[in-house]
Image (tube, rainbow, N blue to C red):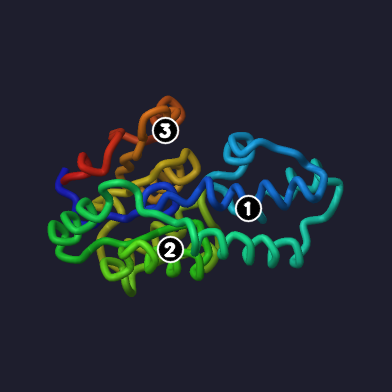
Amino acid sequence: MTFEAVLFDCDGVLVDSEAITCGALRDMLDENGWRLSLAECMAHFVGHTVRSRAPLIEANTGKPLTDAFMDEFYRRRNVRLDKEITAIDGIHEAVQHLHERCEGRIAVASGADRYKLEMMLQKVGLHRFFEGRIFSGHEMPRSKPHPDVYLAAAAHLQVLPARCLVVEDTPVGITAGVAAGATVWAYAPPLAPTDVLTQAGATHLFAHMNDLRI
C-alpha cells in the first residue's frame, strides 16, 4: 500500500518519556500508600491516561483521585521531563524522511496533554516537523483506545484513515489506530513484548527507527 500520511504516537515513539513520567507517578503513589516498582507502574499505566486509571489508583491507595493529586503529578512530571527527556534513537532521520516522502502530511496523535506534547517536541528538536499538526487525546471526546485523536489528525490532513500509516508502541494505541481504520506499525525495540502488539492489530513490527521507511 502507498501511504499518503503518517500519524505518530508521541510517548515511546518520538520521545523516550514513559519511564520518566511513570517514575514521577510511582513516587506519588508510594507517598499515598501504593508501593510499586517502576516496571510494575509502567505495566499499569503506559498507554493510559492517569485519570482513566482512577478506579485502580483508588482501590490501591484507598483515597480518591483528586484534582490536587493530578496538579502535583503534572508539576513533578513536567520538571523531570524538562530535565531528562530525550528523543528515540534515529527518530529525527525517520521523521525527516517521512515528512519529505508525504509532502508534510505527518502529524502527532497522542493521548497526552498538549503542554506535555509541545514541551517534549520542542526539547528534542522535533516540533518544527509537526507544528500545527499536534493532536491531544485530552482535547477529544474520547482518548485512546478510542480512535478519536487519529480520526481528527487524518481529517486535518485531508487524508482518508485507510490511506494513513499509524506508528505506535502500545496495545492501547494500536487499538485506537486500528479502530480509526488505519494501518498500524509498531515500534518494538529489543525486549518489547511483541506478541501483545501483533494481537492488538499491528501488521508490521520494527526494532529501530532506521527501519521506518515507506
Q: Label 2: state its secondary structure.
A: helix
Using the rendered image of the protein, determine whether residue 199 is visible from the camera's viewpoint: no
Residue 120: assigned label: 2
Of pointers 2 and 1, the one earlier in the residue sequence:
1
**Residue for badge 3:** 197
Res 205 quadrant in image:
top left
Q: Earlier in the sequence, mark 3 or mark 1?
A: 1
Distance (Cα) linking label 3 and label 1: 26 Å
Q: Is residue 179 above or below residue 95?
A: above
Task: Residue lying at the far front in this picture: please name it.
Answer: 83
Tag 2: amino acid = Met
Badge 1 is on which residue?
A: 24
Q: Quadrant of residue 8?
A: bottom left
Marks 2 and 1, how far apart at CA: 16 Å
In the rendering, at what x and y percent does residue 74 appear? 62, 64
Q: State the SS at label 3.
A: helix
Question: Measuring 79% from the left and 50% from the top, which residue is drawn there?
Answer: 31
Label 2 crowding class (10 Å Cα cut-off): few <14, some 14-19, many 20+? Answer: many
Q: Nearer the viewer, residue 42 or 155?
A: 42
Seen at 37% across and 68% down, the residue is 122
Question: Between residues 87 and 194, which one lies in front from this camera angle?
Answer: 87
Q: Nearer the viewer, mark 3 or mark 2?
A: 2
Question: Disc 3 marks which amino acid?
Answer: Leu
